[in-house]
Amino acid sequence: MPESVPKLKFEGYSEDLRWRVEQNDRLSLVLAKVTEVAVLPHVVFKVLELSASTESATTDIERAINVDPGFSSKILVLANSAHMALPRKITSIREALLFLGFRQVRQLAMTVGVFDLFAGKNDRESLRRRAWWRHSVDSAVSARWLADQTKKVSGDEAYTCALLHLIGKTLLDRYGGVDYKHVEDMMAQGLKDYKAEEAVYGCHHIQVATAACMKWRLPESLVSGLNYAHAAEPDDSSRFIRAAVALASRIATFAVEGADISDQPNALPLWALEVLGLVRVPGDQIIQSATAAIAAWNVQL
């Protein structure tokens, strides 16, 4: 590993989180190239338009920001930056907006508006990244619906965490140094996405998302929830938000594919259903209700 790329080192986070990412040299190489989180231009334009009007409600700007993982993370990074000296961590877009105000949000939009992480150099890259964006938004809406139904986790935190849960894929695609097509080819042969990513890049999107969000100093309650692909231990304090993200991500897949789960007993992660107290609710009922919430949200976009 080149000496110019220092090993990852994160202070202020639990030993469990640090252990997951600090020892991976390949992950350090990827993270060394990550300096900004890109945003979708149309989101930036919408925020500029709304924040320029004194008649705009905080809810309107929150809605515009909430569809974009890149801009959402930038807002949270700014709100939690050291010079703000907040007494506690800001964990939702609404809290950040109320604290920062329209003017600062507008300035941030102009600063980061030139970036577009979701645009590829060719049609295949662009389609891939736009699919990840769509999945992230659908997952976020589903996670908030799950939070509202179960009362196990904050709806705002569940939404934000689900919105960011695939951001590691876009960072690998952009900074990993290898065409993500190789991962897709391995997945076509039946390998799980994170296993294929590890084989190609030496690290996977969950590790990248976790390390990136720690680098941006996001709250641990959000960062911990990104480990959605693995069952949480009973005493894990992040088990509720992890379960919400894990379940929401699967629901988002079914929302797009429209698959019949009647012959798929493991369609939804059992551990997540148990943690959220939904194990006795029919899986197709959960998917139908959450998908309806996704459809209702999409109409408003």
Image (cartoon, grey):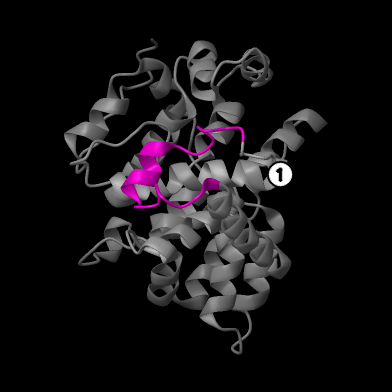
Q: Which residues are magenta?
A: 263-283
In percent of width and height, residue 215 lies at: 36, 40
Specify the quadrant that holds the N terminus: top left
Asked whether the viewer can see residue 285, the reply is yes
Asked whether the viewer can see residue 219, the reply is no
Residue lying furthest bottom = 55
Name the residue: 37% across, 34% down.
Answer: 211
Q: Nearer the viewer, residue 280 or 213?
A: 280
Name the residue: 47% across, 60% down.
Answer: 144
Query: Image check: 116 left or right of 264?
Result: right
- Identify the image quadrant of residue 160: bottom left
- Identify the image quadrant of residue 135: top right
- Identify the image quadrant of residue 121: top right
Query: Image check: 301 left or right of 170?
Result: right
In percent of width and height, residue 98 lies at: 41, 76
Q: How many marks?
A: 1
Residue 127, compared with residue 30, is above or below; it is below
Amino acid at pointer 1: Gly
Helix, strand or loop status at disc 1: loop
In percent of width and height, residue 253 lies at: 62, 41
Name the residue that disc number 1 marks.
258
In percent of width and height, residue 170 lies at: 58, 35
- Indicate whether residue 274 is drawn in magenta: yes
Name the residue: 50% across, 34% down.
Answer: 168
